[in-house]
Structures are given as structure tokens and as C-alpha cells.
Image (cartoon, rainbow, N blue to C red):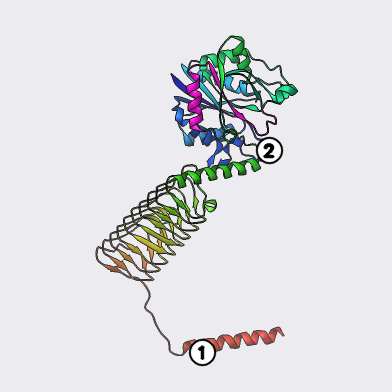
Amino acid sequence: MGTALVILAAGKGTRMNSDKPKVLHEIAGAPMLVHAMRSAASLDPERTVIVTGFGHEDVARAVADYDETAETVLQPEQNGTGHAVQMTRDLLGDFDGDIVVLYGDTPFVQGETLLRMQDARVDNDLVVLGFEAADPGKYGRLKMDGPRLTAIVEHADATDEERAITFCNSGVMMGSASLMFDLLDNTNNDNAQGEVYLTDVVGIANARGLSVTAVTCDETETMGINSRLQLADAERIFQDRARAELMEDGVTLQRPETVTLAFDTVVGRDTVIEPYVFFGPGVTVESGAHIRAFSHLEGAHVSRGGVVGPYARLRPGTELAEDVKVGNFVEIKNAQIDEGAKVNHLSYIGDAVLGAGTNIGAGTITCNYDGVMKHRTTIGRNVFIGSNTMLVAPVTIGDDAMTGSGSIITNDVEDGALGISRARQVNKPGFARKLFEMLKAKKDKQTKEAE
């Protein structure tokens, strides 16, 4: 039996005080909605449907960017969670499998938890995810009779006795598509909020004699994000968890609290990461690398034995082969650096290929942009690029070649050749003293006139 994922993401999130839809605010470089989609990957869903509302077009684009197979459906008016699920009927009404309802502003539900819900679903018609709340507040309460979930009572509709219950509803629910829509057809909006509650299906299912149960998870998994403060807290939770996982996997973080990871950062064992390193999305670092302090990596791949930094920036499209060294104040973008090559100081390498064993001198720049188009620089194997060389692309430097320091290279340099392009130096004896005397005299004159 297959699974369809339904994620509710229609809310504006007024407490965010933002023109951006709430679910598109980012945690670790990805919209919180994407985190919710990733959490369900363990279920291998056949269909994914996102229910949108405010900022529909922006949300739909973000969904397509992450998963082009996912579908979106618009909920024009937000009339409750049950109404939101009903909006998916045209897409999932004939689906022969289970629906799992998640929330785009609840990004931390773990895959293992959803798999436990799936296991519980074998012997139950409906499965709800609950948690023991330290402060139940305004959460809906789960009323249990042994393993049986008898009702979900919203806080606004709960009695004082029901509000004393600490086992609370996360909102996550699993059941067959046919049953879910059938139960929703029997709900109404006769409640304090005047909305169609998804939670009402539990009472209807019990009245029919169906089996309903609840699975428990840690409260941190159910954290909903409704404000910038909660967003910052979610970032902290993610970073703490991700850093701990890296260290458990054999990565050394010298000052863990200073390292920022992205939602998809991958780092191999025995890599050392120094303080204040920032990982943007799309970074893979293989085993045995060394990322030195204050470096910034995004969309880059660092192979085994690579050394990056300190104060280096790797931008999207950077591919470093084994044992490559990228030093301080070096920026690399959309470039392939082959095995053992070195770019050690104060250089920019963009839209380029560097061959194995090549050494790039300090201050070198690949001049890749002509104001309209980008052009490529190709540098061969075992090349020595002298300090302060400007390589004006498109240009090719052959194997075993060399450029003279301070050169502006606009033409190809063949294998084994020396390319040099700079004006001849001329020394004028005594001219410096004369020039200083002229300048000082001019300054003295200006000072007297000012007085």
C-alpha cells in the first residue's frame, strides 16, 4: 500500500511580520517547508501535495525547486485543518493508499517517528502523533483509554478537566485516503473557531467502532514556528543536532558552537573543522579534509586531504580534487581544481580548470567577465602562475608552462612556455628627491595661503 504526503502550508504567519509566506522562512539554508518534506522521505511517498494559501505562487516555486514531482493545491480561504485536507480531494480522492498529514511550519518531525506511525497503522484505522508537553498551553489534548485514542479536544473547547491533560496533539495524522475523506465529509464547523477541524475525524471514527491510536514523540519534534523568535530557536535546535551528528560520525569540530551547517551539509570522518566556518547549501567534504577558521563554503565539493582556508570562500560549482590546498583570502567559483594543485594566497579563480600539481601565485585573478559574458580559463598540469598575474579569459595555459609575475595574459601560452607581459622598468636617478621637494613646496604654499 502506497503513501501520499499532504503538507498544510496555507497560513500567512502574521506574527512573522513579513511579506514572505511563513513556510518559506529558512532554517539552515532551506525553507521550513522543505524540512517538512525531507522528514517524510523515509516513507518514500508516491505522491506529495502541498496545500497553499498566502503567497501561493512563491510557495509553489519553492516546492518545484526542491521536488518537481510534488503538487500544490490552493486553499483560497483558510477555514481550518480539515478544510485544508479536503482541498486535496481532486488530487487524492482515488488514491489507493494512506495519507499522512504534516505541517509546513513544523519542520522537525523525524523520519523514524513517521515510520513508527506507519507500523502502528498496520493494526489501526487512524494513527495520530502526540507528545507530552512541558506546558500544554493551547495545544489540543489527546484523550486516551489505554492504547485507544478516544478523542482530540481543542483547547478552546476543552473543559478544565480536559485542559489538565498533558498528552497533546501534534496535528500529524495517518490513515487511508478513502477513510480520511469519508470522515471529513461528516465534520462541521460547529466549534469556538467556526472552522473544520481535522481532529474531529477521531471522534467520528470512534463512533463507528474504528480503531484509533496515538504514537508518542519528543516534544522538540512537534515545534511549530510562528515568530522570528521561534525561528531563531529552531535554527539553534537544528544546528545543535546537526553538529552532534557530525561529531558522532567522526568529524572534529574544534569549537562546535561557532560552526554553522546547512540542511544538507555532508562531511566525512576524520575531517577537522576549525572555528567560525560557515556551510551554505550544497557542500560535501570528504574524509580527512581540513577546513580552517573563518571560511565560507557553498555549493562546493572538497575531496579527501583538501585544506581550505583560513578566510577562504568556495562558491557554487567549486570542485576540489584530492590534496588541493586553498589558502587565506582566496575565492573560487565554478572551477575545477585537480589533484595536488595550490591556490595559497589572495587570489580569485572563477570559471576555470586548474590541472594537477599547478601552483597559483599570490594575487592572481582569472578575469572571467567582460561586462556581458562569462569566459573560461584553462590551466594545464604542473603550471606555475607568477604572483599578481591577470589571466584574461578566454585563455589557455599549457602543461608545464609559467607566467611572469605581474603579467597580464591575454593570449594562450603553449606547453612548457613562459608567458610574460609587462612594461619595461625605467629608473631615473635623483628624480624621487626632486619630486618630493616639489610636492613639499606645493604643500607649504597651500598652507600659507590658508592662513
Residue visible at 55% across and 51% down? 257
- Going by the numbered disc 2, the residue's amino acid type is Arg
- Judging by the rendered image, the residue that carries numbered circle 2 is 15
Q: How many marks?
A: 2
Q: Dot 1: within a 10 Å radius of its alpha carbon, few (fewer than 14), some, or many (20 or more) residues?
A: few
Residue 189 inside the magenta-drawn segment: no
- Residue 141 in percent (x, y) is at 66, 24
Residue 126 inside the magenta-drawn segment: yes
Residue visible at 62% across and 32% down? 54
- In front here: 135 or 234? 135
Q: In screen coordinates, is 140 left or right of 387?
A: right
- In front here: 290 or 342? 290
Query: Farthest left residue?
Result: 416
Mark 2 residue element: helix
Mark 1 residue element: helix
Q: In screen coordinates, is 163 left or right of 388?
A: right
- Compared to 280, does 121 lie above or below? above
- In front here: 382 or 414? 382
- Compared to 186, does 369 lie above or below? below
Specify start and end residues of the magenta stretch as a single range. Answer: 110-139
- Compared to 148, does 135 lie above or below? below
The tag earlier along the polypeptide, 2 or 1, is 2
Quarter of the rendering containing residue 451: bottom right
- Compared to 159, does 19 lie above or below? below
Residue 327, numbered circle = none
Q: Inspect this view and state whether residue 96 appears.
A: yes
- Judging by the rendered image, the residue that carries numbered circle 1 is 434
Q: Quadrant of the N terminus?
A: top left
Residue visible at 51% across and 89% down? 434
- Going by the numbered disc 1, the residue's amino acid type is Lys
Callouts 2 and 1 close, C-beta under 8 Å: no
State the separation of the CA atoms marked 2 and 1: 70 Å
